[in-house]
């Protein structure tokens, strides 16, 4: 199987993982809204359920997996493009777009690591709602 085909398959997987993380963030925000409404009405919330903050922490870890996979794909594409240039194939196109895409993906991974640490610390503190 050609490398590009495998990279496209991995890209689909990383997108699916990111969608799962985003859906969990949506669920967390929805639960947080219900809690806010209940608290405003003086209704005691059920503390035995998983909190929106815990859901957010899980979602950020899932997003980290998807984003890391995307960064690995971008790095692989950059290396493949560099090989083409070294071998004299398709030298008309610049490496710059691939470099920018690769760097951008790794910056997003770093940001997601920081967010994941923060959301986990918030969940560990017992916060019921964490807004990201």
Image (spheres, rainbow, N blue to C red):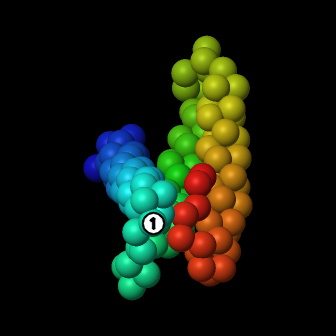
Q: Give the left or right position of residue 114, taking residue 28 as reference.
A: right
Asked whether residue 104 is in view, the answer is: yes
Q: Is residue 102 above or below residue 47?
A: above
Q: Give the left or right position of residue 59, taking residue 85 as reference.
A: left
Residue at the extreme left = 1
Pinpoint residue 85: horizontal percent, then vertical percent: 63, 30
**Of residues 99 and 112, the one drawn nearer to the viewer in this rendering:** 112
Pinpoint residue 129: horizontal percent, then vertical percent: 54, 64
Asked whether residue 86 is in view, the answer is: no
Q: Residue at x 60, y 72 (%)?
A: 127
Which residue is denoted by mark 1 in the rendering?
A: 42
Circle 1 residues within 10 Å: few <14, some 14–19, many ≥20: few
Where disc 1 sits, the SS reads: loop
Q: Is residue 19 above or below residue 61?
A: above
Q: Is residue 97 above or below residue 53?
A: above
**Of residues 73 and 119, the one drawn nearer to the viewer in this rendering:** 119
């Amino acid at each position: 199987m050609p490398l590009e085909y495998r990279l496209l398959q991995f890209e689909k997987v990383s997108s699916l993982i990111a969608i799962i993380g985003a859906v969990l963030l949506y669920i967390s925000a929805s639960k947080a809204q219900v809690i806010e409404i209940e608290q405003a009405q003086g209704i005691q919330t059920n503390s035995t359920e998983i909190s929106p903050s815990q859901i957010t922490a899980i979602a950020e870890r899932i997003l980290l997996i998807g984003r890391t996979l995307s960064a690995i794909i971008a790095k692989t594409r950059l290396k493949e493009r560099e090989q083409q240039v070294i071998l004299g194939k398709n030298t008309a196109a610049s490496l710059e777009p691939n470099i920018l895409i690769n760097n951008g993906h790794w910056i997003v991974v770093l940001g997601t690591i920081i967010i994941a640490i923060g959301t986990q610390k918030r969940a560990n503190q017992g916060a019921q709602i964490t807004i990201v």
